[in-house]
Amino acid sequence: MDADPMDTTRLDDDLRAMLAEVESDRRGEPSDYLEDVAGQHVDGLAAAVCTVDGHQAAAGETDHAFALQSVSKALTYAVVLQEVGLDAVLERVGVEPSGEAFNHLSLHDDGRPYNPLINAGAIMAHAVLPAGDHEERVALLVRRYSALAGAELEVSQDVLDAERTRADRNLGLAHLLADAGQLPVSAREAVAGYLAQCSVTVTAPQLAVMGATLAAGGTNPVTGERVLDEWVAQQTMSVMLTCGMYDATGQWVAEVGVPAKSGVSGALLGAVPGALGIATWSPRLDERGNSRRGIGIFEGLSARWDLHVL
Ligand code: DON
């Protein structure tokens, strides 16, 4: 990164300039089932960054809270690695890009989902969390997500209700995982918890701090709390780089080159190791389910700040 991380005026100015560049882009549609969820307004736009030194900048609707959705998959992967260790997680879920859409089954021959950032792998990673039932699993995640963000986060009941109306495919995936003999809890239990983790809401500045905590090797640069071991942050960002943008990840790495994870709410989280976290929110999605204006902002910032990791 060639921006002086101390120069928050430049961070602010560049963020505002990037937002102005993408603002008029109305291509793509928001996720249909989330359209009715309170506050999910289709042309909303926010972006935020937090450096590993704790310097923050933000632009757009920075107070607006949106659901993490699939961004939670990367965060849960970090939490479960921290809780049970790498070997126990690798026994249940791999680290290979699937090359298929996020809601495909994509299992290795031994029954393990390809990676923790597709739905099957995310349901598995959730199920491996050490806890008695799904409420305890969700409570553990909310605590750890909050530490990553340096803020008290919670599950949005509104979003969770919407998720529950269209859980058939996730339940189907979970039943197939159970049938393959790999799921440590029941399919219903696993999906109930997974949907709740997707329904945790954050603002763009909070999400940027989560990214900065990963980028800083597991210590939250704002609160100073060590939340994750360094190897956990490294493993999580590795899988974000190779699998985080679904079947568009190859193009993303070539053009933007930042470990990232997208969500159907229009959320996008990036973590540039040793430099900063970036978060954007804009609900209109492209055909692969990634936020259009979010991608535009990341492309612009990557070029401006020389963020490509290669
Ligand atoms: O699993 C689902 O269907 C949602 N709760 C999350 C999916 C998601 O964010 C996919 N993203 N593009």
Image: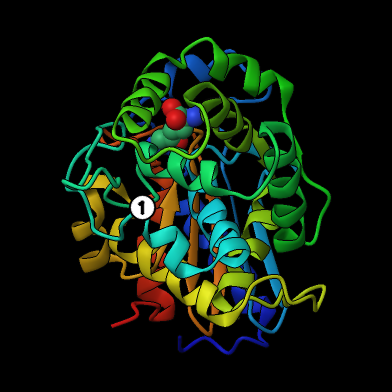
Residue 142: % across, % down: 73, 46
Q: Quadrant of ligand 1?
A: top left
Closest to the observer: 284 or 161? 161
Q: Residue at x 36, y 63 (%)?
A: 239
> Which quadrant of the figure has residue 96?
bottom left
- Asked if residue 236 lies left or right of residue 196, the reply is left
> In the rendered image, which residue does mark 1 sit on?
93
Closest to the observer: 177 or 101? 177
Q: Residue at x 53, y 34 (%)?
A: 185
- Asked if residue 84 lies left or right of residue 22, the reply is right
Question: Badge 1: few (under 14), some or many (20 or more) residues near its Cα, within 10 Å?
Answer: many
- Asked if residue 210 lies left or right of residue 282, the reply is right
Closest to the observer: 294 or 242? 242
Quadrant of the frame with the N terminus: bottom left
Quadrant of the frame with the C terminus: bottom left
- Farthest residue to the front: give it: 181
Label count reads: 1
Q: Is residue 158 visible?
A: yes
Q: Residue at x 19, y 59 (%)?
A: 250
Q: Is mark 1 within 8 Å of ligand 1?
A: no
Q: Is residue 62 visible?
A: no
Eyeballing the image, is 132 above or below 254? Answer: above
Residue 128: % across, % down: 53, 48
Q: Secondary structure at mark 1?
A: loop
